[in-house]
Image (cartoon, rainbow, N blue to C red):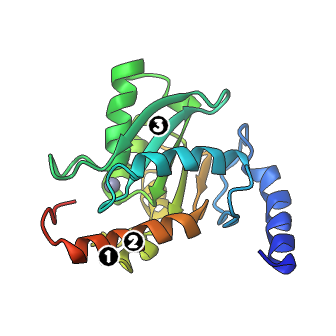
Amino acid sequence: MDAGRRQFLGRCGVVLTGVAAPFASRPDVAQASTGTGTGTHHERFMWSAIEQARSNPKWPFGAVIVRSRTGEILGRGVNTGSDSPLLHGEVVAMNDYVRRNGNQGWADTTLYTTGEPCSMCMSAMAWADLRRVVWASSIDDIRRTDISQIDLTARQVAASARSFYTPELLLGGVLAHHTNHLFREAQRLREEDPSAEVA
Ligand SMILES: [Zn+2]
């Protein structure tokens, strides 16, 4: 990393400390730094989501749900769309959370996901009142790797649920340069082996 970029990321880190810290109380809709994993709070958990994603190399959508206060991982998931069109990584992680913790306590959690939540998943989070969501690659990033995307951003879906849903943190771009690479690699794998084309 060159000095200029490091300086830029450093400034981002300062800015984000105020608005994206674990206990932030107001919504943050900023783009995150795309730092190289030097250990920020959000990057640490995004690496866990990436670890999940690696178990489905052709469709690397992974997610973890953590207790915002302690960082304890409460649910994990990876896209298993070949089993059901509903089973995006975020939904699998939410189902895992419910199995382990019951359908409660969502407001104290943060979900980390390798790809910006689609409208189905973001709606599920709104219904659950899961208020803190951090993603890496954007919907546009993912679409560029030949994966169909419904053209609604996570923030648009959240805003459409404003009558009952007040997110505290909607943060995109965390480790996106890593996940963008993962999605490009996934595209190459799918092109090499077109079998199992279902997400
Ligand atoms: Zn989804």
Classify 89 as above or below 189.
above
Q: Are marks 2 and 1 in contact (CB under 8 Å)?
A: yes
Give the distance between the C-alpha atoms of the residues marked 2 and 1, in whole angstroms. 5 Å
Residue highlighted by disc 3: 129
User: The residue under label 2 is which amino acid type?
Assistant: Glu
Residue highlighted by disc 1: 188
Classify 185 as above or below 122.
below
Look at the numbered disc 1 and give the secondary structure of its residue: helix
Which quarter of the rendered picture does the C terminus lie within?
Answer: bottom left
Q: Which residue shows up at 50% across the image and 64% down it? A: 179
Which quarter of the rendered picture does the N terminus lie within?
Answer: bottom right
Residue highlighted by disc 2: 185
Q: Nearest the camera: 91 or 191?
A: 191
Q: Which residue shows up at 66% across the image and 27% down it? A: 70
Q: Where ligand 1 lies, by quadrant? A: bottom left
Q: Earlier in the sequence, mark 3 or mark 1?
A: 3
User: The residue under label 3 is which amino acid type?
Assistant: Asp
User: The residue under label 1 is which amino acid type?
Assistant: Arg
